[in-house]
Amino acid sequence: MSGNLDPPAEASAAEVRAIKAVIEELAVIPRLPTSTGERQAARLIQAHLNRLGCVAALQPVPAYHSYAWPIGLLSAIAAAGGIAGLRGHRSIGAAAGALAALGIADDITGRINAFRKMSMRPRVAWNVVAEAGDRAADRTLCVLAHHDAAPSGAVFDQSVQEWLARRHPAVIDRLHTNPPLWWLVLAGPALVALGSAAQRRAILGAGLGITLGTLMSMVDIGHRPAVPGANDNLSGVAALLAVARRMRDRPAPGLRILLVSAGAEEALQEGIRGFARHYFPRLPPRKTWFLNLDTIGSGRLVLLEGEGPVRMHDYDAGFKDLVQACASARGIDVTRGLRSRNSTDGIVPSKNGYPTATLVSVDHRKLMPHYHLDTDVPEHLDYPGIVDAVRLVEAVARELAIRP
């Protein structure tokens, strides 16, 4: 492992101030996917990266602005089918439920996005892509973050998890994944189809109830403004800038670094898919690694083992172990063994065959506080934890730079 090159305490304090300043600057901008605020944030990030010695470009990519509306419309189709099924139209209920379930599974996994393409007009998301490090090197580390912010919604209320953490902390401690809420979204239309086909009114009624709940949740989310998104994911954006600063001050010959701040992640990875279409043909998987930073300001860094809203997709074991070894060499505490039933930008390069790792964070209770809530503001962040993530990215970069 590469040696310890961490700056002295005075420099670390300056780094915290710089990270905090970036987050506070961007958090006041409403940054829904594909919005003018997202573009404004992208321009500011580009300017920061250029000032740090990078060659940064603002890149527009076609993107859809929300997951709430296509999934809401599919839920409405399933609900209409469920009502038809209750009235004796079995084939209509079965077909509507099955098609809606397949459409939702396709949309949340990003395979084809068929219904999204049919029901929505594409807009423009704004990615920022900057080059740092040794631009002539044949090996590349891509460090990912996203600068758009999510809308909130009643479904993100944390009262239940807070009650569990207070009254039954052992339950939280035993969990290794977050609840699979997308399974519930899928279950509604699937039960509508099953209940209609089998003429089982109880099953059909349960499916209809779940589907109507999903529909109301999606309408709620679709009408909400953006949350400040300080942790999710200005923490990752600020870390990108800090990595750029470190690479400028202490270069790592032998490794090109792409710093990518994507737009429209909160529309289910729309921005990074645009990046993939443009860059993946030029990035050989054997000489390219992806390190994704998403919501890293909760205090306790987590190296995700895998993620996936429907089927779990594990990240590359060898690259995860390299990241872990770099963390251990720098004395950075990184939690292992956790998986996510949501999805981040890291899932896109991973599914395309690139060695990928994703860093997130939880608090001391293993929870992610303020997630998709209006309370996701700069004053709730753990800034030393963000600096640890920066230190870890730098350590991984230096390790890849010297590897044969």
Image: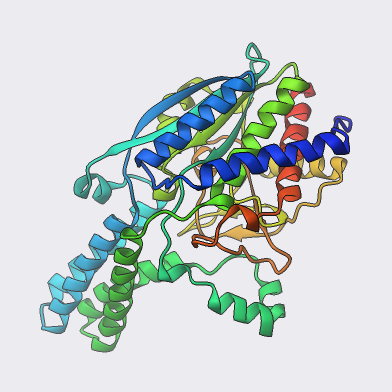
82 vs 236, left or right, is left
83 vs 160, left or right, is left
Let me know if residue 220 appears in the view.
yes
User: Relative to residue 33, is residue 209 depicted above or below?
Assistant: below
Residue 122's spot in the image, x, y percent? 26, 39
Q: Residue at x 26, y 81 (%)?
A: 204
User: Relative to residue 263, is residue 400 depicted above or below?
Assistant: above
Q: How is the image coloured?
A: rainbow
Q: Residue at x 32, y 44 (%)?
A: 112
The one nearer the camera, 129 or 286, is 129
Residue 342's spot in the image, x, y percent? 50, 57
For the C terminus, the image quarter is top right
User: Relative to residue 207, is residue 63 depicted above or below?
Assistant: above
The one nearer the camera, 106 or 32, is 32
For the N terminus, the image quarter is top right
Q: Which of the 4 quarters of the picture holds residue 52?
A: top right
Q: Residue at x 29, y 69 (%)?
A: 215
Q: Residue at x 89, y 30 (%)?
A: 3
Residue 238's spot in the image, x, y percent? 62, 39
Let me know if residue 404 appears in the view.
no
Q: Which of the 4 quarters of the picture holds residue 299?
A: bottom right
